[in-house]
Image: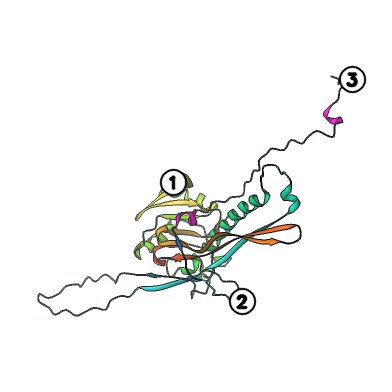
Amino acid sequence: MTKVTSAMATYDVTTNREDLTDAIYRITPEDTPVTAAIPKVKATAVLHEWSTQALSSINTANARLEGDALTRAASTAPVRRQNYCQISSKDATVTGTQRATNPAGIDDMMAYQMSLKSVELRRDMEAIILGNTGQNAGNTTTARTLRSLNSWFSGNAVRGGSTAADATAATAAALDATAGGIRTLTEALLKSAILLAYTDGGNPNMVSVGPFNKQIISGFTGRSSQQQIVSGNTILAAADVYKSDFGDLKIIPNRTQRERDVWIIDPTKLALASLRMFEPQELGRVGDAVTRDIISEYTLENRHPDAHAAVLDCTTS
């Protein structure tokens, strides 16, 4: 086999256009199942506040004499709760030259970058809400921080090892177990946490779990059929259903949260409160470049901490 004499080949030509598909593909995960599932409410101040109410204890001696003069019982006042709004942001800077070019798959580089930043910001918010931080009022040199889910637990978290402990105050993080306290997630641990929430009056119906421990749960005997979580015409996540003694719970894999944590929640008893949500800002031109910022100022509204439970300090591989 020989090449035809004097035939021009692609090897001889340097002006052929490159073959670059007019599309951009990315694999980075962007799903945020917990913040997608919980209600959204409006915050009107940096310190967001709400009230919770618990019923009095069951009284099995609740019997009165006929014609008895009533002894008036004390009423139970609602509990005022609070959380600070945290500011999180992402920014992008694009030069004038870059905005004037014609990159593959992008009509406007700045608009494209801001769409990426909004996805990144949404993931950050999910991880922060499901993280382990206490609230901080902040000052001129310290950024405000919200109280994340882990810090809210008081008795409903099944923690590992003797060093692990619930947060001692709203401003404190919980204590994670050290290496010696990390243990494998078991069905018995999951059941014990569900029991804690149910006993305290909760009705959790969602389990948010990292990918490794999602595979562990798939081997539990209580696991049932698979369902899809749908909002409108959008499928938010695929979920197995775990049939507990106290109702069905959707098991939702979450790549954004810490792998060591397994959250057992009632989404109606949480909310994402926003003072500002995905607010774009033009930071102006510096030289021949433009910077834009996207900001969220938000907090976690834990409508009743006893409605939720957790299995924490689980192995991650």
In this rendered view, identify the residue nearer to me: 219 or 17: 17
Q: Main secondary structure of the magenta part?
A: loop
- Whether residue 112 sits left or right of residue 258 in the image: it is right
**Observer able to see residue 158:** no
- Residue 17 in picture, x, y percent from top left: 78, 35
Mark 3 and mark 2 in contact? Answer it, CB < 8 Å: no
Q: Mark 3, residues whose alpha carbon is within 10 Å: few (<14), some, or many (≥20)?
A: few
Q: Amino acid at mark 3?
A: Thr
What range of the chain is rendered magenta?
Answer: 9-38
Residue 213 lies in the magenta stretch: no
Mark 2 → mark 1, Cα distance in angstroms: 43 Å
Q: Residue at x 28, y 76 (%)?
A: 75
Please tell me whether residue 215 is drawn above or below residue 302 in the rendered image: above
Front label number (3 vs 2): 2
Q: Residue at x 55, y 70 (%)?
A: 145
Q: Could you say which disc has been placed on residue 5 in the image?
A: 3
SS for callout 1 = loop
Q: Amino acid at mark 2?
A: Thr
Would you name the residue on which mark 1 appears? 232
Q: Mark 2, residues whose alpha carbon is within 10 Å: few (<14), some, or many (≥20)?
A: few
SS for callout 3 = loop
In this rendered view, identify the residue nearer to me: 181 or 165: 165
Q: Could you say which disc has been placed on residue 140 in the image?
A: 2
Q: Residue at x 71, y 50 (%)?
A: 99
